[in-house]
Image (cartoon, rainbow, N blue to C red):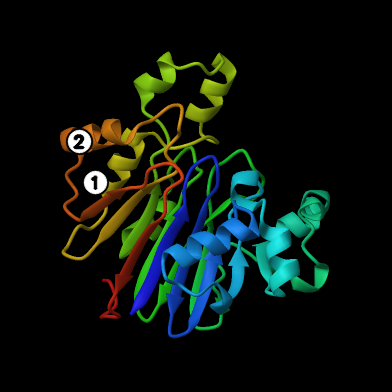
Amino acid sequence: MIHYSVLGSGSSGNSYLFSYEQAAVLFDAGFSLRELRRRTQETSLDFDQIQGLCITHLHPDHCRGAGVFARQTGKPVYVHRQLVEQNPLELEKLGIPASLMRTFTTEQPFQIGMFNITAFPTSHDSPYSVGFSLEIARRRFTILTDTGMIDDTMRMHANCAHVLFLEANYDVPMLDKGPYPFLLKRRIRGERGHLSNVDAIELLNSCPSESGRQVYFCHLSKTNNRPDLLESTCCTHLKWSGVTTICQHGNSYYGSLDPGEPIK
């Protein structure tokens, strides 16, 4: 069985774990090492099986635990090559030992053990931000969060996913009426910000929805969104017929899949 977990999603921390045949890979480490271990144990997965950590971007809610993870586990951390070349001071702040730093480039597949991984660019206000597609035993998973717009590459990776972890950060009316200052609202709604509920649903409506496909709506804002608002928007606008899960802020979610035929 392929096991996976949204260990946490939202401004307090983001992390995703995938496990297959006594090996695992972690995406983002927005929690302390102790909290990552605790959340992993709650899903009955084995933290010590993790073979590496991949980072989407350098905002703290995605990487604050990366340095401690590397130093205490001795496992490598994978970051965009351009971050190493052009933003070394930001990486130094995380405290990742140079000996455990690994790099990737977008649209160039790489492997961590048996996990085949491809990074693709996202549009966010953090340099060289990426999403990830992961193939395990002929099943495909895609993490697509922290982007203010969808391009053809992102759409392709979403279309190929058997399980899609998709940002639905804000409800437009709630953001407009909320407490944030105008400039912050404009940043969130901009092309280098986040996806709204409607943005996420519009993307999902263009994806294949044959039996077995799943989506986890992730990265809901605690201030500018609510699960019931997203659910209501889905009821009104969602035509996609796969299985949906709305990840509430800070909670963990677990799933598993039998390895099967490649997704067409």
Give whichever of 11, 264 is nearer the camera. 11
User: Would you place residue 117 above or below residue 202 in this image?
Assistant: below
Kind of residue at badge 2? His
Quarter placement of the C terminus: bottom left
Quadrant where the N terminus sits is: bottom left
Give the residue displayed 45% in from the left and 32% down from the top: 222
Q: Position of residue 202 (x, y in %)?
A: 29, 40
Left or right position of 168 against 208: right
Mark sitting earlier along the chain (1/2): 1
Residue 81 shows in the view: no
Query: Under tag 2, what secondary structure?
Result: helix
Picture coordinates of residue 250, whole percent (x, y) = 46, 45
For mark 1, give the secondary structure. helix
- Of the numbered discs in the image, which one, if any, rests on residue 55? none
Q: Are marks 1 and 2 in contact (CB under 8 Å)?
A: yes
Mark 2 highlights which residue?
Answer: 237
As drawn, the label of residue 205 is: 1
Give neighbour class at mark 2: few <14, some 14-19, many 20+ (Cα, 10 Å): some
